[in-house]
Image: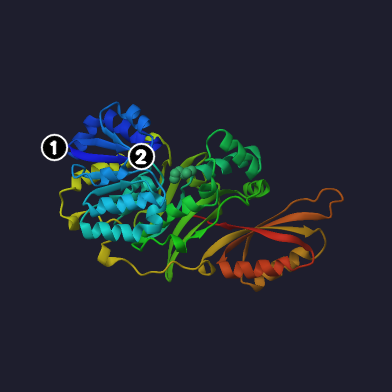
Amino acid sequence: MKPINVGLIGIGTVGGGTWTVLKRNAEEITRRAGRPIRITAVADKNVELARQVTGGEARVTDDAFALVNDPEIDIIVELIGGYGVAKELVMQAIAAGKHVVTANKALLAVHGTEIFTAAQEKGVMVAFEAAVAGGIPIIKALREGLTANRIEWAAGIINGTTNFILSEMRDKGLSFADVLAEAQRLGYAEADPTFDIEGVDAAHKATLIASIAYGIPVQFDKAHVEGITKLEASDIKYAEQLGYRIKLLGIAKRREQGIELRVHPTLIPAKRLIANVEGAMNAVVVKGDAVGTTLYYGKGAGAEPTASAVIADLVDVTRLATADPEHRVPHLAFQPNAMSKLPILPMSEIETGNYLRLRVEDKAGVLADVTRILADHGISIDAMLQREPEEGEGETDIIILTHVCSESAALAAIAKVEALAAVKGQVKRIRLEELQ
Ligand code: HSE
């Protein structure tokens, strides 16, 4: 049977894994796809590396544009990342009538509307399973497996670097800075880890999850993005004492007035399965109205786990390449003419529980003043912990967990609490989700 021809752009970690797995499992993949999937050309700046990996079995070039304009190539796999050249390559490939498979979450989260519209007009597919949670088939699950459901919420540990750092901070009681330095030394964290530790990478992925869960356009610019750089080991310890773990979650939640789309450190009950996802692993919980709560777990990065997702997309595209475009699964799960106008809610309108850590003078009436302020703002207390002060210390930490309240009520109450003379410095606040 006539093979489908693939042009691979970028043969680094994921590209190399894609080459290896496609070759190793060629027979089974062909039986599934219905015809052989063959990488006929590879473009990489490092031509020597491309030659080594492909061993003369594919044409090698340093000119990626030669691939997107090659009439012999049916599918372009874009694995170089970023918004610049990658966007030009993807747009040119679409214009040339080629299907695209990409792992580029940043590109799709920011320019997805333009890219999907162009693909729709041209009748080609843009597949992106590898863009979210690496090897976990979360796009497939949301877009197809859960298609009967109204998705209530999805919450995921979708950045392995930060989950590794949080696990180490908890296990070893170390500071964020110490663990980051160690992770970089061991090669677990990038030399420039900004996108990971500031929550940007997770927000790119959460943006894509929200779009396919609710059929809304990709709107990374409206996502709330908060990383883990300000987390302190003491908060991880106090959370633990109260039966919670702190995870960097990407959350997409449907509310009547709109969609919550946010990434931030979050206390979650230690007894939830997702709270026990440790190290660089990823996991996503999705709550559908019919199915209830479902959990997807696996490796969110790495050569072969990510290649697994890239090749799944290649098989999907191969099976549907000759189908009428209207009979394919829509890019964002909902038909393009049936997209929702539900807005992304501003943070002032979101609702969560809260962890509050206060440094206070150890004297009569302080706690009464604090709880009065919370009550005045309609905030109900769920649990409380007070550290016993050291001999002669005169100050202590009070930890309060609140029931769900609005962000604006929480911020107003915190400002009032910080203004109390007996409260020292700022209140440390971390949002809390029960994930029920
Ligand atoms: N840098 C990401 C992570 C993997 O740490 O999970 C690629 O998205």
Can residue 150 be seen at all in this image of the molecule?
no
To which quarter of the image does residue 301 belong? top left
Please give the name of the residue rendered at 57% of the width and 37% of the height, measured from the top-left corner. Answer: 183
Tell me residue 46's x, y (percent).
38, 34
Question: Which residue occupies the foreground of this view, 321 or 235?
Answer: 321
Query: Disc number at residue 111?
Result: none
- Which mark identifies residue 10? 2
Find residue 2 and name its label: 1
**Image location of residue 11, percent across then percent down:** 36, 36
Viewer-side label of 1, 2: 2
Identify the residue at image location x=80%, y=55%. Answer: 395
Number of numbered discs present?
A: 2
Up-down relation of residue 284 to residue 44 (above or below): below
- Res 431 → quadrant: bottom right
| N-terminal label among 1 and 2 | 1
Q: Amino acid at mark 1?
A: Lys
Helix, strand or loop under label 2 = loop
* Label 1 close to label 2 by CB (< 8 Å): no
Residue drawn at (34%, 57%), measured in percent from left and top? 290
Q: Amino acid at mark 2?
A: Gly
